[in-house]
Every structure is written in C-alpha cells, then in structure tokens.
Image (spheres, rainbow, N blue to C red):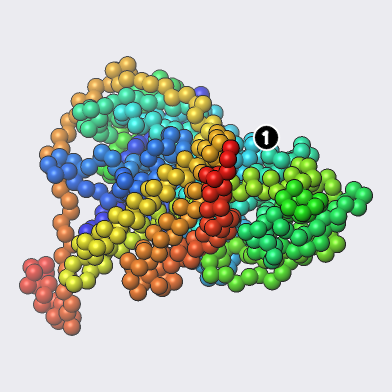
Amino acid sequence: MAAVGTLSRVARWGACNVIGRSRRLIFNRIQKRGIAASIDPSIGLTDEQKEFQKVAFDFAANEMAPHMAEWDQKEMFPVETMRKAAQLGFGGIYVQPDVGGSGLSRLDTSVIFEALSTGCVSTTAYISIHNMCAWMIDTFGNAEQREKYCPDLCTMEKFASYCLTEPGSGSDAASLLTTAKREGDHYILNGSKAFISGGGDTDVYIVMCRTGGKGPKGISCLVLEKGTPGLSFGKKEKKVGWNSQPTRAVIFEDCAVPVANRLGEEGQGFNIAMKGLNGGRINIASCSLGAAHACVQLARDHLCVRKQFGETLANNQFLQFKLAEMATKLVASRLLVREAARALQENRPDAVSLCSMAKLFVTDECFTVCNQALQMHGGYGYLKDYAVQQFVRDIRVHQILEGTNEVMRMIIARSLLTES
Amino acid sequence: MTGRVLVGVKRVIDYAVKIRVKPDHSGVVTDGVKHSMNPFCEIAVEEAVKLKEKKLIKEVVAISCGPQQVQETIRTALAMGADRGIHVEVSGKDYENLGPLQVSKILAALAKKEEASLVILGKQAIDDDCNQTGQMTAALLDWPQGTFASEVAVEGDKVKIVREIDGGLETIKVNMPAVVTADLRLNTPRYATLPNIMKAKKKKIANVKPQDLGVDLTSRVEVVRVDEPPQRQAGMKVETVDDLVGKLKEAGRI
C-alpha cells in the first residue's frame, strides 16, 4: 500500500518534474498531514490558531527537519534558519507588537512551538528560551530598555541567553552566589553561571545576581551584552542531545554593568526569573509534545511497514495496545499544556501550579512515548539514520532543566499544603 | 487598466494524505480528511502578490468556489498578501459536480464584473488533474492565455510569459487583459507571517451566488465509478539479454 501511495502522490503532480525545486518534502513522513483525528493537534483550535500552526508545521517540515540530523551531528547553531523563523514572527511570539513582537497568546505560542518541535526539538527549545528572554525585557524593562533590546531580539538580529543556574545552585536557585556590588552608576559582577544555553554565541545575557542579602529577596536581574570587559565563557559542553545549541559556563570577573541595565527594582530579580520560567515551562512542555507527536507518527508508520512472523507489526496486539497508550498519553499531555497556557494567559490563581503540573507530567509522559517509539523500531531505532533516537535524546533534558521535575513536585505540593 | 488581478484558489485534499476510495466507489473519502490550498494555486497567489509588491498591479482578489470551508483557503490567500476575497457559494450536489467548465464560467463572469487586468490560476488541481480551467476561462472571455508559465513579466499593457512546453521553453507576449496559469517553477510560495495572518482576519471576503453571476452549474459529466489503481505486481529478474527478449515475446510485447 505504501508503494501505491507514493506513486499516486507523484502522479498527482501531473507531468511536471518534482525533484527540481519542490517547496514541499513529499517524503517527509513526520509532517504528513493525513493524521488520525484522535491525535490531530489542530482539533479545538480557532481558525487563526490553525493558520499559525500550519505555518509552523510547514516551516518545521521544509526548513528544519531536513537539517535536524546534521545540526545534531555537527553541533551547528543554525543562525540563518532561526533568523528566517524570526522573519515569520517567531522571534518574539508573546512580546508586544510596539517593540517588534507578534503579540500572541500563551496558547498560540504553545501551538507554534509544538509544531516547530517536530522539525528539530533542540533548535525550537533554544527559540523558546530566546522568546522567554525577550518577554522578560518587554514586561519588566523600562521604555529605554525595551526600545534598546526588544526589536533586535524579535528579529533575531541579536540572540539571548537566560543565566540563573550556577555550579553551586541549580534547584536551590535562590542560593545563587554571583555578586553584583554597586559602585557609582555600575554594578561590578563576580561569579559564574553554568549550563547556559547559547552561552558564548549569543549577544544578550539576562543574569540573575545578588545585589542584597541572602535568599530570593537579595537577587536582581541585569542585562549584559557580549563583549563587556570581564565577561568570558567556559568551554563548549559535550551533551547527549540539544546539540544544535551550544552550552557554556558564563564567567564574570570584575565585570562592570551599568545600573541602567537593571530590569525592575533591586530585589525583584528572583520574581522576574520565576515569572519568566512559568512561560518557559509551558514552552518546554510544548517542545516535548511536538517530539512525542512526531514519534507516534514514526512508530505508526514503522508498524505498518515492518514485517515479522509473516505479518506486519501492526497486526500484533501488544504493539497495537502500546501505540494506543502512547496516543492517549500524547493527547492527555496536549490538553494539560494548553490548559496551563490558558491559565497563564488569563493570570488565573492556578496558573503557576498548572504550569508546573504541565511541565512535570508532559515532559515525563512524552519521554516515555518517544522511548517506546524507539523500542518499536527495534534495532533500527538505535541507529542515527533514524530520527526517533534524536527525539529521545533531545527531550530527555526537558525533565531536568527549567526546574527539575522534582522541583515541580515541590511547587505543586506547596500549593496544596500551604494554608491560604 | 484597473490593475486588478483575480487569483483562483481551490481547496483540495492535502497532497500528503493517503487517499482512500469510498466503499461505494462513488468517489474518494473527503470527510474528516485534511484539506489545504492546491499547491499550484499557492504559486499563483505568490505571483500575484509579487506583482503587487513590484507595483505593477494594484489589487489582488482571491476567489474560491465551494461550501463554507473554502473560506479557510481564501484566508490563507489573504494571509499571503491578497487584498480581499470572493467566496462563490456552491454546495451539495452542485459542489460534487463542479468542474472546470462551471468554474471557468464563474471566473469569466467575475473577471468582467471586477474589470480585471489579469486572471492568474494554478495550471491544474492535484485532485482532478484537469488542466482546463485556465484555458476555458480565456476562451469564454476571448482573452489571450499564457499557460504553464515559469516566468511572468508585466510590461506596460502587455505581459511577457515564458511557458514550459514539451519542446523546452516558449516565450510569448500577450495583450492584457489575459489569463495566466502557474507552473511549478514560477516561484516558491512564501510562508504567511504571524502578523499577516492576523491582518488577514480584517480583510473582507464577499459572498456571491452563481445565480447572481448568471451562471448555470449543470454538469455535462457524470462520474460513473472511482477505483484505486491496481496493486503493483512484482517484477521478474532475468540473467541475460536473450532471456529478456524471450520473456517479452512470451508476454506478447514484441
């Protein structure tokens, strides 16, 4: 049946030569839109959201998926592709239009990142971090800061990094040690940040540092630019996945930053960081969702093609049941992420908990889905020629960063057990 | 010349979908199946928008014939840069029987009504592969036509069109108003940008009925039966050229 499908697809283009310059990838199975209604990601969306999703899927299929493996193997930071994405409005999706953003909602953003992720998880995850940084400046910056940074970030003329984690403070983020001592109209920064996505290759750094006493209330948020004296970077880390974005330590040695570069008030930094992360968690969960969606399609296609014991794997009840479970996890995850996005957009009282629940549930479940998809591919699933292993490697880290899933549990438990 | 360009866009089953024939063999399954704009129509819209950006024409009007759902397709054209849309309402049995003859009558009527300078269509639709609508529209209007265009250049009140033909490339110059049909290599359609998708919401889509245009939709064609292509049979390997010739003779091919 697959052969007939392919022939009739080519025949439908009439007498023309499709190999020349087809804008479409006829043989890319992930973005194939002939998809079962039960897992169709466009169900329940408005017409406008379906249009956004369509653009994101097309972009993922044409501009990202063909290069996903190469970017991973060669560890390339795809600057040109991301700038193309920015031209479509993906550089500042939920940033306000007056500084160059697209002014869309959190739900629109989730839908877009879910679709882009089917093309390359690692690149989409970086784009989401970049968006988070642009939003932080847009929301907490004063007029000068917004004018200075947001337009370039929205066009991706400049790239951004979010610097919170340190060698000594990951989950215990509020115990960070990077100091910022006030001297005249500058802060002098000393310390280092670890695991910074984009570090060394990006231009704008949003750094959480200690201007006051211990704990969260002593933390402020500063914006630094690459090239500032005293700002240097560690070696590029070698990672299991997320290889299309460089990860480096960011080091401050008597680095002077103008007080004018502070976002918000002194002591407000931790609050700004956490607000950024609420949205960031939805975005990361959406990236996991896209990967799981792609893997369910890949697994399904493989089951229909691979034969053992005289019949296709699709006739095997265990695998049918496994696929059904994967689809169910996918849909449940999607519903939770989209609800969390709505809650955040409307500033509902359950927004923070829901974002944490979404991040926790979705990253775990989608990793299971992708892992099972790899298993269904058998030995082929382990080869780098097949995309499924890259999805598994790329989304594994989603259970760790932007707040480990253990920290997510802390946040949720606190919301349940604190007397209001 | 009004500088107005009409672009016809057709809503078809998405190219990537696995087509299935209905159990009663009356057609293919369309319910619940993903539809999108015909790829050649996208190329037509892109060409029209490019002409507007070069300021060679003034307005791009996207037209589609069909039920309520075709408005999605018109919106996609608006998101790509068309200025307004016209939805010609055709539904039910009329829509099932809608073919190039009926559509070309509708387009001809609209072209006269809108005083269009140019009508750009896709060369064919990927569902019926007719490759007739452009030609019929030109004939009904008694306008020149440039089909299978791989290059279009507006020069004053004439259009220079490079056509892809069996023998290679043919360049013709026609007077406007004219009909052009887009071939694959004419351009690469742009992605709609997020801001343009939002702007498209505000653009107007007018509703028109075929009767208002004085068009009779009766079909002269009746689809008797639809079947899948036969399953591809396995081939045979032979050792020598003599074997091959022998087998071909056996099969009555030579």
Does B243 sit above or below residue A8? below
Residue B231: x, y in percent?
16, 59
Residue B77: x, y in percent?
45, 35
Q: In the shown orientation, is residue A220 left or right of residue A238?
A: right
- Mark 1 is on which residue type? Asp
Does B234 sit above or below residue B162? below
In what quadrant of the picture does the N terminus of chain A appear?
A: bottom left
**Residue lying furthest bottom:** B240
Quadrant of res A371: bottom left
Is residue A14 or residue B204 the one in the foreground?
B204
> Residue at image x 40%, y 33%?
B72
> Residue at image x 63%, y 70%?
A237
Mark 1 falls within which chain?
A
The residue under label 1 is: A98
> Residue at image x 64%, y 36%?
A96
> Residue at image x 42%, y 22%?
B206
Is residue A182 or residue A156 the one in the foreground?
A182
